[in-house]
Image (cartoon, coloured by chain):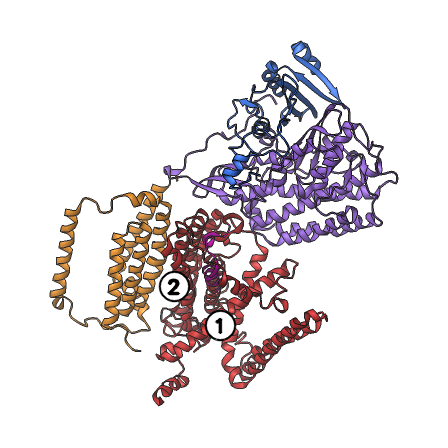
Chain colours: A orange, B purple, C red, D blue
Amino acid sequence: MAPVATPFFFYLLSGIMLIGGILVITRKNPVHSALALIVTLLGQASIYLMLYAPFVAGVQIILYAGGIMVLFLFVIMLVSIDRAMKERQFNSQWVVGIIAATALGGLLIAVFTKGKNIFPEHMLPVVTDSNNTQEVAKLLYGQYMFAFEIASLLLLVAIIGAVVMAKKRI
Amino acid sequence: MNEPNTLSHLDLETHEKPFLDANELVLNMGPQHPATHGVLRVILHLDGEKVLGLECVIGYLHRGVEKIGEHRTYTMFNPYVDRMDYVAAVSNGLGYCETVEKLLNVEPPARAQHVRVILTELNRIASHQLWLGTHALDIGAITPLFYTFRDREEILKIYEKYCGARLTTHAFRIGGLQYETYAGFEKEVKNFLDFFRPKIDEYEELLTTNRIWVERTKKVGVISGKDCIALGVTGPVLRASGVKWDLRKAQPYANYKNFDFEIPTGQNGDTYDRYLVRMAEMRQSVRIIQQAVDGLPEGPIIAKVPKVMKPAVGEVYHSIEAPKGELGYFIVSDGSTQPYRVRVRPPSFVNLQALDLMCRGQLVADVIAVIGTLDIVLGEVDR
Amino acid sequence: MGQIIQYVKSYLTSDQTPGAAGNMFWVLVYILLVFAGLSVAVIAMNWLERKILAHMQVRLGPMRVGPHGLLQPIADAIKLLLKEDILPAEADGLIFWTAPFLVVLAAFTVFVVVPFGPTHAITDMNIGILFMLGVSSLSVLGIVMAGWASNSHYPLIGALRSSAQMVSYEVAMGLAVVSAILMTSLNAEGTGTLSMIGIVQAQQVQHEWFIFKFFPLGLVAFFIFAVAMVAETNRAPFDLAEAESELTAGFHTEYSGFRWSLFFLAEYSAMIAVSSIAVTLWLGGWLRPFPNVLSGATWDEIFSFFPGASFLFLAAMCFYNTARMPKHPLFRIQTIGLAAFGAVLGLIGLVLFIPGVRVRIQDIFWFSAKVAGFMYLYIWYRGTFPRYRFDQLMRMGWKVLLPLGLGVLILTASVALLQQKIWRP
Amino acid sequence: MIAKLKANYGSGLEPLTFAAQNYMVVDRSLIPEILQILRNEEQFDYCVDITAVHYPAREKQFDIVWVLYSFPRNERIRVKTQILDGASLPSSVPIWPTANWLEREVYDMFGIKFDGHPDLKRILLPDGWKGYPLRKDYGILQQDHEWVQINLGIESGQ
């Protein structure tokens, strides 16, 4: 099978993701922002596909694009858009924002320049097509079992918290 | 019965605040909406899908029937009443004719009375059939509509043969009937009864034990008998709330006292009970028609009434049990050929008032079910 | 030139799907075929639904446009295309316009992995079923966008209802699917698969459709899926999102003409898509019925006559009805039309009897026949059931189907584990 | 019953019968009291109808009619009173909730005001309409031309 992981696709998808990300924070209408975020997430799923991780890509689409973002939109649609449009977009904590952005940018540049030493190339063999999902499962339920269960517990706490907050009496 | 006659559990002035002070959603339903049975406009105040309150806007079909009545002679006004509740035109005609007969102090002959009962009860069946079809359609069952219309057609055929019209029949005249029944009338009515009895079972088979139907109708639009009386709600809605009251028994008119039938009642006053009551009423109507057509006497069909009717000065209120409830006429005569004042007490208009009470706290889908179960005809609400 | 012909020819000898073989020419051909077939299926479904529903309701349905209304869907399509495309004032134009395309895109893209036969699929992905669920879940986005962008209350409520409904029923659906996927791992290596073709092949290897596997576990999982899929496609009795008696038309109230017809197209192709999943997962996909009881080359031969025979039967029905047509001159065109239609069907039937065609076509036939069974169920539901209320729908999804799905999943896993331990000590 | 009421109220109340139907003409001032008594003590728990009749020649132009029915007694009675044009009546919504729409209709058609009514506005005619159609001086072809012109955009106003 011919490889699709060419630089052209990488730059195309990254470009789409970047444009989507910028739209998320610049659009005044929250529904537009959410839709732009969905575009970004779909681009991310495509990049997973390029990395030969189809299972993660599929899960990304089902959970984020198809599930979570629908709930986001659900909430946003119920909020009065007119009032949100009138509010000032960027809040006044821009000093903190610039510091955070610079720090993150510096980190990224550092990783990019020194990355060759941190991540040796082709350390992990490319997982073959057929048993990709099984490999993910083995890692998740074998090596990283504890982390996985901790994450589930956290999510459970979040769910209970949400129910308690939404319902006055249970 | 000495406690104050106010509504039991709800204060209809204000409705409770929406959850977390969210904006209440105002949804305008109608006047052009598939499930408002005509041109009813309902303004719904919603919290999500929960109904906090609603307001009916009516009058889109107002034609000033009462005003027209003041400018027509007693005979000329007769066809107009058919245009109010156009799915039960015969009942309207019966109520009007009987009221004027009371004013004139005439008694229609026995044969006319029998034919009147037959046609009126056929009309009750037709009206309930139309109700069942549209009500089921509102709740999402599309098939019963076609079954009921297929069978209603047979009734309309009998009307067409008798008086030439199918819907606005103008079947009765003041003092009796204009036309003798056509040859084979009795046989056709009997045939219809034999044809129709299994059809009621067919309707019930489709709906009565259908899980979704039961879930959609039980405990929906509940109204107690006390609230019904306070709001003046009559007809099957009142009977489904457990009040055994039917004008045909309580204050018999025409010659209903000669016939043997029962008043079906419900206990819970919910949409399902109203459905059962109406189904049972159709069976009772079949029973009445059977007795009437079996004992149809020979004789004249119209009493002696003057060509130009000039009733004595006075006023009369008379009401009958129309398919939808108490249909009353209040006619004031000033001794001339035209009524001085005609007032129609429409059952649909008064019953519609209960919509707000019945829908509070329910969901949007239930509003549709309740509008359907009240069985309103906008022609009668607006007149 | 010769190279191109060589390229085109090279696929014919391979036993893979064109996608897996990497042959772009055949991929395109398959895409066109699937797209055309789907459009024809939607048109046929439109006619059949109206006709079957009509006969359930003691009426005739379309009878005027063409013999027995056969040309009605075409007339409808022309009408819809010629209608004015209305953009409501103060609607969000861009989202309003893109929403129907997104829905159609999602509904059609899933057919990339639907296996009509062991090699009759556009491609075979190793995450096939996940891809189908994922892409079909994107159509919710289109519906939400359509409802919000219309800037009107009925579409908004319709969109809210339909998205809530689809998101909740996806969970139960996913659980049912997982329990079927677990069953694919019952082989010598103990490795399951997510590939659509692999799932059917697993049923072939195990000599059992998954609906009968671990009776009644497979059946229950199938039942959960069958309920969830009706809810997922917003069809009666779960058609609250477009309940015409409550919300006039739900999320597509404000749409007209071409864009409305896109929603229509998407709804019907989504119905076919979820039915395809059900057929693939539980009903043995393209496998013919009774492969175990009636096995052997003779039975294979006999079953391969079915496709042609069914078309001939339809043709015979057409000719019978042609003979019953009124003899009035006004009906002459209709009579000729019906006879011609019968002739076309008969011709197709005869072509399907050619030995070479017969063997290749039967996979597609059995798959389509099973899907058609589901389509009939959809119509039957619509003719029979009243509509659920929203809270009842949610209660059923979360309180009945979800625990049931979890239970089935756990039981299936335990039974599968036990069997594997005994089978492979 | 009627005799008892007659004994209590004397000249303010006049019992009458026409075509075997009982009704009583009551003085305007006694109306709230009589209705309350009929509802609470005489068990007339169902208000069938409220309507009015216009007599332009009289000094007291309007007849208001309450049609009442008692479930326990299975009996009907009509209460009638006469009022001047422009005079108002106490609302009977607190006594019979059904009076709400019935009184609105009387207001809509005759312009008679009911004090204490929770929401007295037109019911069948549109809100801005001028004139009260069921008064005798309102012609059968008469319309509120201005309203039609403004709200329906019909030039002729018909």
Comparing B123 with D38, the one in front is B123
Q: Position of residue C110 (x, y in %)?
A: 41, 67
Residue C37 disc label: 1
Comparing B376 with A68, the one in front is B376
Residue A149 shown left or right of residue C213 in the figure: left
Q: Chain of mark 1?
A: C
Residue C93 disc label: none
Q: Main secondary structure of the magenta part?
A: helix
Residue under disc 1 on the same chain as residue under disc 2: yes
Magenta region: C248-268
Q: Nearer the viewer, mark 1 or mark 2?
A: 1
Give the distance between the C-alpha atoms of the residues marked 1 and 2, in whole angstroms.
20 Å
Q: Quadrant of residue A152?
A: bottom left
Q: Which corner quadrant holds the N terminus of chain B? A: top right
Secondary structure of residue under mark 2: helix
Q: Which corner quadrant holds the C terminus of chain B? A: top right
Check the image and report above or below for B314 versus C36: above
